[in-house]
Amino acid sequence: MRVTQLFDTVRGIRAAVVRAAQHSTAARPVVGIVPTMGALHSGHAALLESARRSSDVLIASVFVNPLQFDDPTDYQLYPRQLEVDLQMLAEHDADFVFAPGLQEMYPGYPEGPLVRVSAGELGRRWEGASRPGHFDGVATVVTKLFTILSPPAPAECEAWFGQKDAEQLAVIRRLVTDLNLPVRIRSLPSVRDENGVALSSRNLRLSESDYDAARSLSRALFTLKARAETGGPLDLPGLRTQLQSSERIDLDYLVVVDPATLRETAQGVLKQPALALIAARVGPVRLIDTMDLRPAVPPTG
Ligand SMILES: Nc1ncnc2c1ncn2[C@@H]1O[C@H](COP(=O)(O)OP(=O)(O)OP(=O)(O)O)[C@@H](O)[C@H]1O
Ligand SMILES: CC(C)(CO)[C@@H](O)C(=O)[O-]
Ligand code: BAL
């Protein structure tokens, strides 16, 4: 496994990727990219394992991207543990790790980068409304990562993302479509712990009582899933009131949306597949989670 920080070395990576691809038996070798901000956990491991199985060359990136943080404290306190992460990436058989420094990624930061990618109105809903500029920052860094790491033809490029960050996934899918980026987007369901809480790097900052409160976020999502599948009313207002009664939870949103447009779908009884989104500050930490909702299947015959 090679760890790289410099753009020069990245050029070397691209050459090595081409060489590795040439040795592949596949007609169109696949280069898999797993972008992360580090502090890796089993959710990242699931992405790495699937990407490894589907790729001839596996590249992981570790970079805490300041452009997507609107809160400087959140950026400063974001967990960073590169040495531990590298060990896990080696265990998952990554061929390359791209872990650039801040000035390497954004020369002249904070003056630059002047040119950025806008996620448009998709980037201003829900999480984007609460964290202004967040999805523009994600779209900018993801475009840069794809530009730096994606291989020349005939190799194909696949990038792997978690459905936990479903809004981010919707933005990235539109990004590659709207800008014709030659990258196939793959996604995996959220990995949860034994209590149903979605794994997240920020969970490292939760106290025991914060963690107990965090359990009610996923519980609300599972309740919605069950109500959708049994054809009952979703009763979002009731669930919001219940969550807000906990003094450790400052609920930002709990909504049911169309997975592609992120616009709210009709409320009441679910009629088409949808996505539930939740975000809340739990103690000092802002957490997000999502759940795919399927409507009740009408009995046949
Ligand atoms: N529990 C999970 N299951 C599956 N994928 C996940 C999970 N958590 C994160 N991912 C995915 O891993 C990739 C990297 O995410 P990131 O490094 O931001 O970790 P994170 O745990 O989401 O951190 P945080 O939410 O605290 O910022 C993203 O595509 C994200 O959706
Ligand atoms: C996609 C990403 C690596 C961009 O910084 C980040 O938003 C994340 O980890 O989900
Ligand atoms: N995976 C989410 C990235 C963020 O919250 O900035």
Image (cartoon, grey):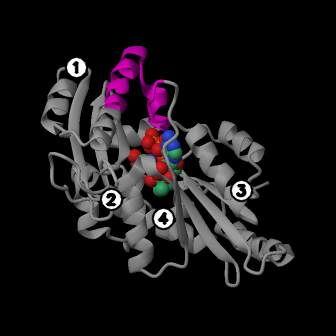
In the picture of the structure, the residue carrying the numbered disc 1 is 246
Residue 227: x and y in percent read 27, 37
Q: Amino acid at mark 3?
A: Arg
Residue 17: x and y in percent read 75, 71
Q: How many marks?
A: 4
Evaluate if marks 4 and 2 touch, with contact meaning CB atoms under 8 Å apart. no
Of mark 1 and mark 3, the one earlier in the sequence is 3
Q: Is residue 151 above or below residue 57?
A: below
Of mark 4 and mark 2, the one earlier in the sequence is 4
Secondary structure, magenta segment, majority class: helix
* The residue carrying mark 4 has its beta carbon less than 8 Å from ligand 2: yes
Question: Quick check: can you spot residue 39?
Answer: no
Classify mark 4: residues with Cα within 10 Å, few (<14), some (14-19) or many (20+): some
Q: Foreground: 226 or 263?
A: 226
In the picture of the structure, the residue carrying the numbered disc 4 is 142
| Residue at figure coordinates x 55%, y 71% from the top left | 184
Mark 3 or mark 4, which is nearer to you? 3
Q: Amino acid at mark 4?
A: Val
Q: Quadrant of the C terminus?
A: bottom left
Q: Quadrant of the N terminus?
A: bottom right
| Residue at figure coordinates x 28%, y 50% from the top left | 127
Classify mark 1: residues with Cα within 10 Å, few (<14), some (14-19) or many (20+): few
The label shown at residue 52 is 3
User: Whole-Å distance between the Cαs marked 3 and 4?
Assistant: 20 Å
The label shown at residue 259 is 2
Q: Amino acid at mark 1?
A: Ser
Dot 4 falls on a residue whose secondary structure is: helix
Q: Amino acid at mark 2?
A: Pro
Of mark 2 and mark 1, the one earlier in the sequence is 1
Of mark 4 and mark 1, the one earlier in the sequence is 4
Span shown in magenta = 195-219
